[in-house]
């Protein structure tokens, strides 16, 4: 829905919006090709966390433990086989603490500097590791990487046993004054429940030139980090990530968003707020830096697969295959959080922040899920401008979304789709025009032909980005199965690209 627009304005704009919608409904050509698959890896993992980004010349993809890049025109792989994380030069640069990064690794293309960025955390002696290319071309004979390691133990806080909280679901975003890294703080003494969040600013200015960065600045909520925390309902922050090549205005604060899950009281299933943090950064005098939280109102919803008996259990998406007990196998919607990215575009006349999540449709635990989206606007602290959802039928579960918008305000969201009615987990996308608030149009990217029977984990996130050269072409990566996966891992990934007819 649109906030702050009256009925007469909507009626006056109806005709041009209808024309925009008609254009968007024209047939679109979606090109897709195979990305990394388990069969090509020596030690494939679960979950795979498929993500990536499109750059000026290549698309670079990550699955846990491995990466590969593909030419944007020919789709040919840059390397003869997927590279293991050991091939990134942390070890060569004498940074052994970064030899074991794995889950929750993120690939970015810093559009403002035209550099590739890889960020991930280690599973022990907690460290956040960043590698930044010296060029936009991954085939260049002069390609090298600037590498950095940021010790985390001192900023994570400790639990009642004196152990550091586990840094989970780390994300990385590009802003003008820093790379912003976000962390969920989980307590291993309480079954790894989320007890808070951490947001850290990394010195982008020095890092992109290979210089020595200033010490990272970190902020927590709650502050101070408790020794014995309780459920934190606003976890999994997403920091705004610059889309396109127009930077935020000079001095613009970074903003971070998360949903606020329903009260953990055993019966509440709905929520009507989201959280927004304003991170004002001062590298010259860090004591002037601030991290301020506000609450935004949104239409009431239930997070995808929400379970009042166990709020961390978000597994309810059915697959067609039945267990021996004649119950559908189910996979995880990860419906308790905003999914990356929180895309930011500076259109000059306004600034737009676009995010997405999975919501439950209707009532009852085992009920259909849909993709929900929101747009924030504002030159100061942004507010909710409009919201909507993608739910074109009454049977399929849509989940694990990632969203972006092109240079003329067309939005596209990619996601997984599955149901107990012969729809194996597959990949789809929908698009619409944000200024016109048109209805979404859905396309199939890749129909799945198999189910995941050996795990309920389905990725943890996917990735939609926009070509920084033409500002129009969307690139998306997600996973699927060509046949049922049982004991042997046989997952595949698919990379797709398409452009809407209204973007030139």
Image (cartoon, rainbow, N blue to C red):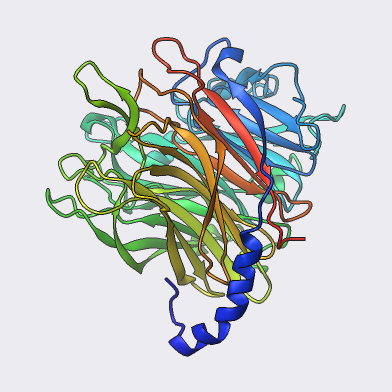
Residue at (68% x, 65% y) in the render:
408
Count of marks placed on residues: 0
**Residue 169 shows in this picture:** yes
Q: Is residue 290 above or below residue 12?
A: above
Q: Position of residue 487 (x, y in %)?
A: 40, 10
Q: In the drawing, does residue 395 fall left or right of residue 131?
A: left
Determine whether 440 is above or below 309 in the image.
Answer: below
Position in image of residue 485 (x %, y %): 43, 17
Q: Nearer the viewer, residue 204 or 24?
A: 24
Apparent side of residue 170 relative to residue 25 in the rendered image (left or right) = left
Q: Is residue 336 visible?
A: no
Q: Quadrant of residue 158?
A: top left
Residue at point 59%, 45% (across, down):
464
For this rendering, which residue is in front, 219 or 263? Answer: 263
Rendered position, 14 above or below 162: below
On-image quarter of the C terminus: bottom right
Query: Is 47 on the left or on the right of 63, as rendered?
Result: left
The residue lying furthest to the bottom in this view is 8
In the rendering, at what x and y percent does residue 55 appear?
Answer: 73, 43
Which residue is rendered at x = 49% and y = 65% of the image? 375
Left or right side of 210 for 430: left
Residue projecting furthest to the left:
266
Q: Quadrant of residue 348 in the image?
A: bottom right
Percent x, y of residue 170:
47, 39
**Quarter of the figure with the N terminus:** bottom left
Which of the pair 221/50 is nearer the observer? 50
């Amino acid at each position: 829905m649109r906030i702050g627009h009256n009925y007469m304005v909507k009626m006056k704009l109806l005709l041009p919006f209808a024309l925009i919608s008609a254009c968007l409904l024209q047939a679109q050509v979606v090109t897709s090709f195979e990305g990394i698959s388990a069969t090509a890896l020596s030690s494939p993992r679960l979950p795979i966390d498929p993500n990536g980004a499109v750059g000026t010349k290549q698309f670079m993809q990550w699955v846990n433990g491995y990466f590969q890049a593909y030419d944007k025109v020919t789709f040919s792989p840059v390397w003869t086989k997927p590279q293991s994380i050991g091939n990134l030069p942390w070890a060569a640069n004498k940074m052994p603490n970064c030899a074991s990064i794995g889950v929750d690794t993120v690939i970015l293309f810093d559009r403002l500097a035209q550099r590739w960025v890889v960020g991930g955390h280690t599973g022990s002696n907690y460290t956040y590791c960043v590698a930044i290319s010296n060029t936009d071309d991954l085939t260049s004979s002069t390609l090298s990487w600037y590498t950095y390691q940021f010790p985390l133990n001192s900023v994570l806080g400790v639990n009642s046993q004196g152990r550091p909280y586990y840094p989970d679901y780390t994300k990385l975003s590009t802003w003008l004054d820093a790379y912003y890294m976000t962390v969920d703080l989980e307590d291993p003494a309480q079954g790894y429940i989320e007890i808070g969040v951490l947001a850290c600013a990394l010195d982008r200015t020095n890092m992109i030139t290979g210089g020595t960065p200033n010490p990272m600045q970190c902020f927590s909520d709650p502050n101070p980090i408790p020794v014995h925390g309780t459920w934190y309902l606003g976890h999994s922050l997403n920091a705004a990530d610059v889309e396109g090549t127009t930077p935020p205005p000079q001095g613009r604060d970074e903003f971070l968003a998360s949903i606020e899950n329903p009260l953990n009281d055993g019966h509440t299933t709905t929520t009507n707020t989201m959280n927004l943090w304003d991170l004002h950064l001062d590298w010259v005098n860090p004591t002037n830096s601030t991290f301020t939280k506000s609450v935004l109102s949104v239409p009431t919803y239930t997070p995808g697969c929400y379970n009042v008996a166990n709020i961390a259990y978000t597994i309810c998406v059915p697959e067609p295959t039945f267990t021996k007990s004649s119950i559908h196998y189910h996979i995880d919607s990860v419906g308790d959080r905003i999914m990356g990215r929180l895309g930011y575009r500076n259109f000059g006349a306004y600034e737009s922040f676009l995010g997405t999540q999975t919501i439950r449709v209707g009532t009852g635990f085992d009920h259909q899920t849909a993709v929900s989206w929101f747009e924030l606007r504002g030159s100061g602290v942004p507010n909710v401008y409009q919201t909507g959802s993608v739910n074109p039928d009454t049977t399929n579960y849509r989940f694990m979304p990632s969203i972006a918008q092109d240079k003329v305000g067309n939005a596209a969201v990619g996601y997984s789709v599955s149901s107990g009615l012969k729809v194996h987990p597959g990949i789809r996308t929908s698009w619409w025009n944000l200024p016109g608030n048109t209805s979404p149009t859905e396309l199939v990217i890749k129909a799945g032909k198999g189910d995941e029977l050996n795990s309920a984990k389905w990725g943890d996130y996917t990735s939609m980005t926009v070509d920084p050269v033409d500002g129009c072409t969307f690139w998306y990566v997600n996973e699927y199965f060509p046949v049922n996966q049982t004991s042997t891992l046989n997952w595949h990934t698919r990379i797709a690209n398409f452009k809407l007819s209204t973007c030139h």
